[in-house]
Amino acid sequence: MKTVEIYFKDLIPEAQAHIMKEFKTTEKEENWDVFPISVIDREEEEEEPVVKIKRVKDWMIFSHHMQRYIREQTVGKYSMTRGSDIDLMSIAEPEIAIFNILKYALRIHNGMMKPDDLFKIAHYSQLAWALSGGKIIGDEKVPV
């Protein structure tokens, strides 16, 4: 961390006059020659790793892809009626979503990944979270 101390004497005369007027004081009545009137600390930048992971930015990009995937691939597939906000998955138990997460994760693990499998895992993760009300699945008493 780098630190810069700013003393009264470092200010231009107009800034000094403004401070003294605002605080109704004089330079002699204060200890501004001994103690800084301001201290600025700044973290030093570390060397960037070879691969920089930008989790929040990457998540935002991924979420845009997820929105498109959900709109184009799931809304019509699971809708009970056209234009309805209710779909078949909204009345399921969170364990069904967990089963599907495992199903697609195992397919990837077994070397049989299909193009939308990561989207399906993310979508079922969101469904499990929503269906559980954000609580730990299997223990309704403990919030996440």
Image (cartoon, helix red, strand yellow):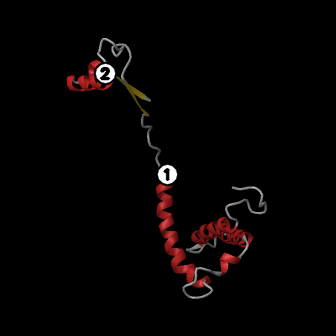
Residue at numbered disc 1: 53
Which is more toward the observer, 116 or 137?
137
Residue farthest bottom in this picture: 81
Mark 1 is surrounded, within 10 Å at the Cα level, by few (under 14), some (14 to 19) or many (20 or more) other residues, namely: few
User: Label 1 sits on what residue type?
Assistant: Ile
Identify the residue at horizontal 66%, vertical 81% (top origin).
88
Q: In which quadrant of the rendered view does residue 99 lie?
A: bottom right
| In this picture, residue 4 sits left or right of residue 90 | left
| In this picture, residue 46 sits left or right of residue 77 | left
Identify the residue at horizontal 30%, vertical 26% (top origin).
22
Q: In which quadrant of the rendered view does residue 74 lie?
A: bottom right
Identify the residue at horizontal 27%, vertical 18% (top origin).
9
Where is residue 48 shown, x and y percent of the image?
44, 43
Where is residue 25 shown, x and y percent of the image?
31, 18
Position of the N terminus by quadrant: top left
Mark 2 or 1: in front is 2
Which is more toward the observer, 5 or 52?
5
- Compared with 85, 37 (above or below) is above
Going from the N terminus, do you reach mark 2 or mark 1 first?
A: 2
Tell whether label 1 touches label 2 (CB within 8 Å).
no
Q: In which quadrant of the rendered view does residue 96 lie?
A: bottom right
Secondary element at image label 1: loop
Residue farthest front in this picture: 24
User: Label 2 sits on what residue type?
Assistant: Lys
Residue at numbered disc 2: 24
Q: Report, in whole angstroms, how far the alpha carbon at label 2 lies from the one at label 1.
A: 51 Å
Mark 2 is surrounded, within 10 Å at the Cα level, by few (under 14), some (14 to 19) or many (20 or more) other residues, namely: few
Number of numbered discs: 2
